[in-house]
Image (cartoon, grey):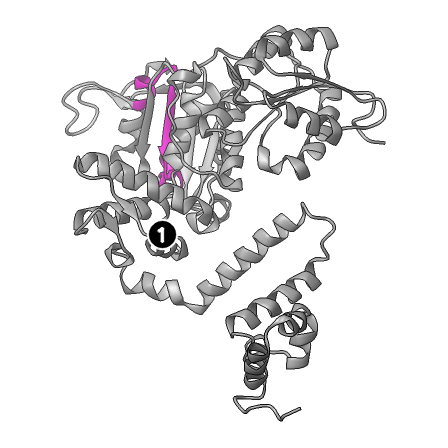
Amino acid sequence: MSSLQDSRILIVDADSDFLSWACNHLKAPGVVTVTAERTEEAVASYQKARADLVLAEVRLPGTSGIELLKRLRMTDPNAMVILFSGLASNSNVIEAMRLGAYDVLGKEKLPYELRTVVESALRANESRKVTRAQASEVPTETIQETIIGRSAPMQDVFKMIGRVSRSDAPVMVTGESGCGKELVARAVHKFSPRTTKEFVGINITSIPDNLMESELFGHEKGSFTGAVNQRVGRFEQCDGGTLFLDEIGDMPLAVQSKLLRVLQEGEFCRVGSNQTLKCDVRILAATNKDLETEVGKGTFREDLFYRLNVVRIHIPPLRERREDVRLLAEFFLQRQSARRRGPVMRFTDDALALLEAYDWPGNVRELENTIQRACALANSDVLLPSDIPLGSIANSRFTHPANTVTRMRDALSSLISVAQTQPDIDLLPWVEKELCRLALRHYEEDTAKAAKFLGIPAAEVEAKADHHAHASAATSGTSAAATATKKAGGKKPAAV
């Protein structure tokens, strides 16, 4: 039985054609669909229709889908809302999830995702119980983009940020060096109720082991050589706020035990003092190490690991979200252009292709530094591949067979995603036919060369590219003779 049965769904969008499509797409026995084009109308319709689910466009006339979500959740904390948009900003995605939206979908994905997500939301709605209203709100107008990415993996990251920002649970941010772990931590703080308090970030590897305890908890005057004054530690400094511990996997074992006590009891002592101090601090931690392995080796406390790893947000490396490379590169280029106060700079298509093909072992940090160097060394406001200072390693990767295979695999993955929206296409035969046709076109209808390129018999090329025979028959006598000459390996065909 479909979860859509006997459900009331409110659909909100200013596009009447889309409303018609959505109503038809969600048609099922017992389903009642109600539509609205504006926020005020949607609020009234929701109360009147007692809708089980609301589907709303982020961009609505007058106000936004985010504002509609706020108003619905204010009057009904159980309101189940799914937002969608053709171009939702990252802040909108995070804010929507923070406010309790079930999901945020790209409008281009609705034909093959909407029904599944709607059924999932309705099933969740049956068992969900809300006991309190959402935490204090952060005005959407004051939120600035902190993280850039439109790829599916990054959209998942934004949604997770929105969810965890509503609580005080410790968060472990994982990912390779340079992928933006501190940006994620700052976003969690910005969208949390602690946003008006201080965010303090420290890198564990930058602090000597013998000063780590003093850095975190402070010290009393005379507690050790060089302690000429009392010092307030980071926990006291950000009381009520958020403390971000970067590279937590490098923390000395002796300090790990003291950090565990803070997490368990919310109290600590300064170095050289017996006075117990209380603090209310949310801990966010980050690492590029495999902490499970470190626990097994005995270099990281197991009990501390479980205290910190309540929620995990993993940031994928840049090579696994290549569709974000162009967006990031353009952003960094615009920022460098603004700093130079010169003409607006731009990439050539070949330069962008080079950036997208590179594996970026240093992730986003390496990309930013590369764009900065390119702008500093460029002779014009147009960046060519030769202006991108990636060196021989990058250039070899650009043409390396392994990289080519990866790009082909990515293209096939995109093809499969698109083909899912076209159920009438028999994919494999279609691909074979199109490959044969394109190969023939590339080799100017030379069947022998096309067959050699594809690695199949010439007769198979002709059979699968069935348009070729029709095209040849439709040509003039001269064109037909020229084609026959090519098929004969350059020899003129015998007279008929």
Q: Is residue 132 visible?
A: no
On the image, which quarter does residue 35 sit in?
top right
Q: Quadrant of residue 18?
A: top right
From the viewer's side, name the closer residue of 251 and 144: 144
Nearer to the camera, 342 or 143: 342
Residue appearing at x 18%, y 19% in the figure: 221
Residue located at (51% from left, 45% from top): 292
Q: Residue at x 35, y 66 (%)?
A: 396
Q: Which residues are magenta?
A: 234-254
Confirm whether the magenta stretch covers residue 249.
yes
Asked if residue 267 shows in the view, the reply is: yes
Q: Residues within 10 Å of mark 1 (few under 14, many from 20)?
A: some
Considering the image in quadrants, where does the C terminus appear? bottom right
Which residue is nearer to you in this view: 434 or 188? Answer: 434
Q: Amino acid at mark 1?
A: Leu
Secondary structure under tag 1 reads helix
Left or right position of 11 against 200: right
Q: Which residue is mark 1?
A: 352
